[in-house]
Image (cartoon, rainbow, N blue to C red):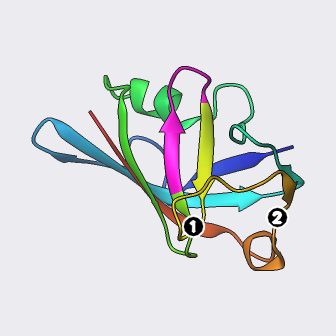
Amino acid sequence: MGLIFTSDTALPGSVHSLGDVFTLVGTLTFSGSYAAGGDTFPSGGDPETLLKRVGRGRVLYVDLSRGLGAEWDAVNKKLKFYSSGATELAAAAYAAALTASPVPVLIIGR
């Protein structure tokens, strides 16, 4: 399995409007390994689908608190991760720092 998103409260409570931009706050639970090209969410659990529940659906930005850069790949419905050098992570098991506990995440969408 890949990533599981959990909102801090039940939708739509975890979605906050800033004009026509919405923020989705929650945590990601990492398991297994990262595959080159991005990691997947269970069916219907990706950020784009969650934002569509409140009439939005375009992910603009993803921010994690544990030092990884992240980018939503809307075409393939995957979350890509980057090192501090802006290089995509290689396929490998997730580091213990990511799998030990859920990682806070902020998703901005329109």
Whether the residues at callouts 1 and 2 have beta carbons within 8 Å, the answer is no
The residue to which callout 1 is attached is: 68
- The residue at the far left in this view is 19
Residue 8 place in picture, x, y as percent: 50, 60
Residue 104, compared with residue 9, is above or below; it is: below
Secondary structure under badge 1? loop
**Labels 1 and 2: the sequence-earlier one:** 1
Q: Disc 1 marks which amino acid?
A: Leu
Label 1 to label 2, Cα distance in Å?
Answer: 12 Å
Q: Would you call the spot at circle 1 few (<14 residues within 10 Å), some (14-19), or many (20 or more)?
A: some
Residue in the image at 76% along x and 42% along y: 36
Residue 81, compared with residue 17, is above or below; it is: below
Residue in the image at 60% along x and 66% along y: 83
Residue 75 place in picture, x, y as percent: 54, 20
Q: Nearer the viewer, residue 108 or 55?
A: 108
Q: Would you call the spot at circle 2 few (<14 residues within 10 Å), some (14-19), or many (20 or more)?
A: some
Q: Quadrant of residue 96?
A: bottom right
Residue 67, compared with residue 50, is above or below; it is: below
Kindly identify which numbered label has been placed on residue 31: none
- Camera sees residue 90: yes
Q: Is residue 23 magenta?
A: no
Q: Disc 2 marks which amino acid?
A: Tyr
The residue to which callout 2 is attached is: 94
